[in-house]
Image (cartoon, grey):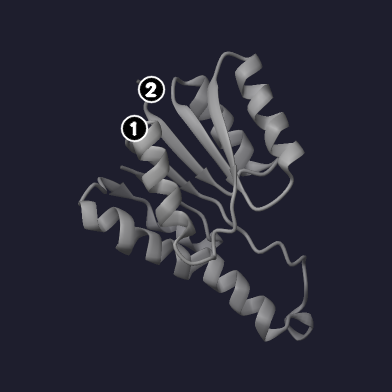
Amino acid sequence: MKPVCLVLGAGAGIGGTVAKKFALEGYHSCLCRRSDQDGLDRLISNIEEKGGSASGYLINAIEENVLEDLILNIEKDLGPIEVLVYNLGAQTGMKLLNETTLKEFEWGWRMAQVHFWLLLQQQLCAETRINTLMPQQWVEGECYVKL
């Protein structure tokens, strides 16, 4: 059984690239994104064509219990998650402060910080499996956890 890398926010940029790198280094990468099934399928196909192992999931990570259920299913089907890449982003565009609504700000804040905290608290810390957390990544709303 291969070690598992879960990438939340596996788009065509950073998330997809990180998922591909882990898959080509011997992990099974679980790629998760909010939309674009065709893009997700292309990423998985590209990984598999190069000899890697991957699966994909369309999820809305800020909905209640979505991440908890996802992790339970992945660990039941594929084994324990050894690496979690939290790369979610609100993608509201480059706006000036006076152009950003409170709703947009709150959405990005919830996605980048609150839901990551909930994920750690409810799912990972309860199992006391966290070995390393690199908090310098919190600034950009990305965090990498070695489980």
Percent x, y for residue 72? 37, 46
The amino acid marked with disc number 1 is Gly
| Spot occupied by residue 92 in the image (x, y as percentages of width and height) | 74, 67
Q: Do the residues labelled 1 and 2 touch (CB within 8 Å)?
A: yes
Question: What secondary structure is marked by label 1?
Answer: loop
Does residue 58 appear anywhere in the picture? yes
For the C terminus, give its image quadrant.
Answer: top left
Q: In the picture shown, does residue 106 fall above or below 93?
A: below
**Front in this rendered view, residue 139 or 40:** 40
- Which quarter of the rendered picture does the N terminus lie within? top left
Disc 1: CA contacts within 10 A as few (<14), some (14-19) or many (>=20): some
Q: Is mark 2 on a helix, strand or loop?
A: loop
Q: In which quarter of the image is residue 101?
A: bottom right
Position of residue 36 relative to residue 44, above or below, is below
On the image, numbered disc 1 is attached to which residue?
79
142 to 46, vertically: above or below:
below
Give neighbour class at mark 2: few <14, some 14-19, many 20+ (Cα, 10 Å): some
Judge left or right: residue 9 versus residue 78: right
Q: Which of the 4 image quadrants contains residue 51?
A: top right
Q: In which quarter of the image is residue 61?
A: bottom right
* Left-right relation of 18 to 147: right
